[in-house]
Amino acid sequence: MSQELSGFTAVVTGGASGIGAAIAAKLQGLGAQLAVLDLNPQDLPEGQLGFACDVSDDASVKAAIDGTVAAFGGVDIVVNNAGIGAIGSVEDNDDAEWARVWNINVVGMVRVSRAALPHLRQSSGAAIVNICSIAATAGLPQRALYSATKGAVLSLTQAMAADHLREGVRVNCVNPGTADTPWVGRLLSQADDPAAERAALNARQPHGRLVTAEEVAGAVAYLASPLSGSTTGTSIAVDGGMQALRLRPV
Ligand code: NAD
């Protein structure tokens, strides 16, 4: 891949940090014009257009998509990456917490897609890539709410692929394993011995280390580009083989 995305405009939610930032950099490197929708769109790399946007707020999402179209003339690629974690069993998170996390992790993707679809239909190479997780199918302990949101992202991806197939809009998802991002850094920093906890986390991965954000971005770039023109409704695991080996990251 060199300039596969030249002439394309990509929207990346949660693109100011971690996996989203790596995706934005990768798509930009492949020639796309970049709009980053994030709660905190500061300090973006040169050439990326930031929008202060909360994917849990419809007006904020509409304004950011309108702003992207005004700046770049359309939208060809949407990467629904913004998401947050939640720890605990069903007894640990109340209705308000379920609504809050669901509203970001699931409905956030619906909202951004809904706002972008009229523009995606105008594109000759439209693609939506949703960032899911191995949590969607792994049966992780103490991750009931988070896992349920990612299970919903998986089925949403398949349903959207069916709905928009004949409109020329492909919809796929990427399922990362535990990836080395600020999110995981925040979790590790709460441990008594963060360095030992990081070493133990690395050791639990089938290939002996965390996934990198750039590796996730590589899979996204493939699914976002015409190279995957006949691929829709599917998912790519970027997890060092964890799903294939039926292992769990925690
Ligand atoms: P991160 O916390 O490093 O970055 C998330 C970004 O999303 C931040 O820039 C944040 O400001 C933004 N964001 C959060 N809520 C938002 C909202 N309501 N509206 C707009 N932007 C918002 O996280 P990350 O580790 O890069 O995770 C990104 C995605 O990857 C998430 O969907 C997560 O579920 C998924 N994922 C992460 C891992 C992992 O191990 N890091 C594994 C599997 C899946």
Image: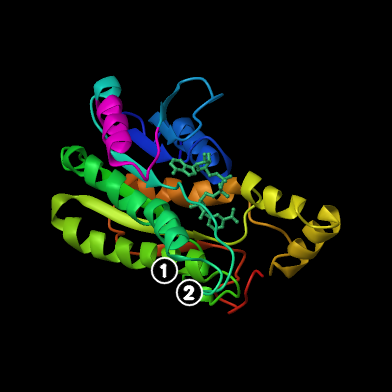
100 versus 54 height, above or below: below
Q: Which mark is residue 137?
A: 2
Q: Which mark is residue 54?
A: none
Q: Which residues are magenta?
A: 53-69
Marks 2 and 1: CB-CB under 8 Å? yes
Q: Main secondary structure of the magenta part?
A: helix
Q: Secondary structure at mark 1?
A: helix
Q: Is 67 displayed left or right of 131 in the figure?
A: left
In the rendered view of the protein, which quadrant contains the C terminus? bottom right
Quadrant assignment, res 64: top left
Could you say which is closer to the camera, residue 241 or residue 150? 150
Q: Is mark 2 within 8 Å of ligand 1?
A: no
Could you say which is closer to the camera, residue 193 or residue 35? 193
Distance from the alpha carbon under mark 2 to that under mark 1:
7 Å
Where residue 87 appears, x then y in whole percent?
59, 64
Q: Give neighbour class at mark 2: few <14, some 14-19, many 20+ (Cα, 10 Å).
A: some
Residue labelled with disc 1: 151
Q: Secondary structure at mark 2?
A: helix
50 versus 82 height, above or below: above
Where residue 129 appears, x then y in whole percent?
37, 51
Q: Residue at x 47, y 41 (%)?
A: 14
Q: Residue at x 74, y 54 (%)?
A: 188
Q: Give neighbour class at mark 1: few <14, some 14-19, many 20+ (Cα, 10 Å).
A: many
> Is residue 4 part of the magenta span, yes or no?
no
The amino acid pointed to by label 2 is: Thr
4 versus 214 height, above or below: above
Q: Residue at x 44, y 64 (%)?
A: 150
Q: Is mark 1 within 8 Å of ligand 1?
A: no
